[in-house]
Image: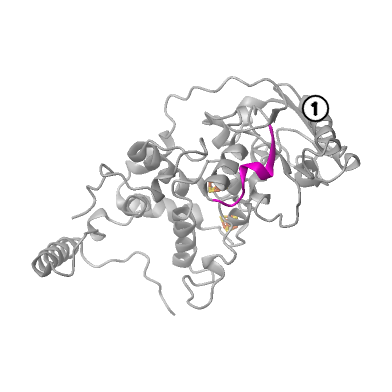
Amino acid sequence: MGNLLEHVGIEKERVHFSWISSAEATKFVDVVKKITEKVRALGPNKKLKKQYN
Amino acid sequence: MHTYTEKIQNLAKDVLKQGKAEMVIGFKQGTIPMAANPFVAKNENDADNLIWSSTCGLNLANYLPGIKKCEGKIGIIAKGCDSRNIVTHIVENKIDREKLYIIGLPCTGMVDKKQIALLFDDEITQFSEEGNTLIVKSETKEEKINKQEYLRSNCKTCTHRNPVIYDELVSDLVEEQIIEDQFADVKKIEAMSSEEKWDFFDKLTEDCIRCYACRNACPLCYCPTCFVDESGPQWVGKGQNTDDIKTFHYLRAYHCAGRCTDCGACEEACPMDIKVRNFTRKLNKDSLELFNWEAGLDISQRPPLDTYQPDDPDDFIM
Ligand code: SF4
Ligand code: SF4
């Protein structure tokens, strides 16, 4: 899934996959923090954003 | 006439006469040169219309799921890639092996019709072949060209020209090609930056008119309602918005993951000459590299997307 997205030009750091159980609250927080950091570093996404005008 | 044509006609007649199958799916000559139309021969007279040539580039496995009424077996002419899509149908429980009578056809490659048409300013009026030489005529000129130079791009890198499953063969098996680098084209895209990749696929799909011929020609696309045609929910916009066009292409490709045989029918059918295999070939490369999998080689093997192995690659999971 991620590989083809990367292949068509979506930055690798923008899409993340994880496996978190409903009992793993701290893991969830950690992963979300990490992802937010990575995506923030990339700046806003301009791709696949539909323009309505 | 192609040397296979007579053999196919005789085999099909024999199959129909002896009741080995109720019908034989093959090709007949289309209304213009270089057009080969899928055709179902139901009796010996019909079988006289069957032909073979290097223009039979569509994938006949595509027509199997549509055949609803057939008491006996369905006969089908299958070149290498068609046979792999037949295997995929069997593996996906679309059809029983026992329901089929497969006439295997060792293939020497199909030609790129659009590339040949570019040699002419006017319309092509005649096409014939003698072994490796293609003789193409228009009102104003005649070209004798080497078939090897005009092969479709998927046929150039094909390593499964011989059918992988059959009940009978049209001729002796042919020698398989040895391809040094199967995925040079994919690697070229992989080496690009994200921006370059984005622009490459923008350019690739800019002429797409969303006729869905690529989807319709593909044996893998047999869902009763395709996601692009659904309206509740509407997964993807229906207009010519570039993001919608690309979304269609991404999702079409994902649905082919681990299933695509690189048969080239999608590109063959595209009226806008869009090289849609650029999407599926990345998935084919990943299937091979990550799961050592090529689609449709063996009816006893389950595809990677419906099996779990403890050692499946999982380094993408955070
Ligand atoms: S066949 Fe070509 S033009 Fe039609 S939807 Fe597919 S890529 Fe687009
Ligand atoms: S996606 Fe194209 S190359 Fe792959 S199986 Fe379908 S028609 Fe053939």
Residue B54 visible? The answer is: yes
Give the residues drawn in magenta, as a range: B93-104
Residue B122 coordinates in the image, percent (x, y): 77, 43
Residue B204, percent across and down?
A: 49, 52
Q: How would you rate the neighbour count of disc 1 (Cα within 10 Å): few for under 14, some for 14-19, many for 20 or more?
A: some
Picture residue at 66% right of the left edge, 26% below the top: B147
Is B142 positioned to the left or the right of B203 in the image?
Answer: right
Q: Is residue B99 magenta?
A: yes
Residue drawn at x 51%, y 67% as measured from the top left: B227
Front residue (pair B63, B215): B63
Image quarter of the N terminus of chain B: top right
Q: Quadrant of ligand 1?
A: bottom right
Q: Position of B124 compared to B159: left or right?
A: right
Q: Quadrant of residue B150?
A: top right
Q: Quadrant of the C terminus of chain B?
A: bottom left
Instruction: Determine whether B65 is above or below B47 in the image.
Output: below
- Is residue B207 a member of the stretch shown in magenta? no
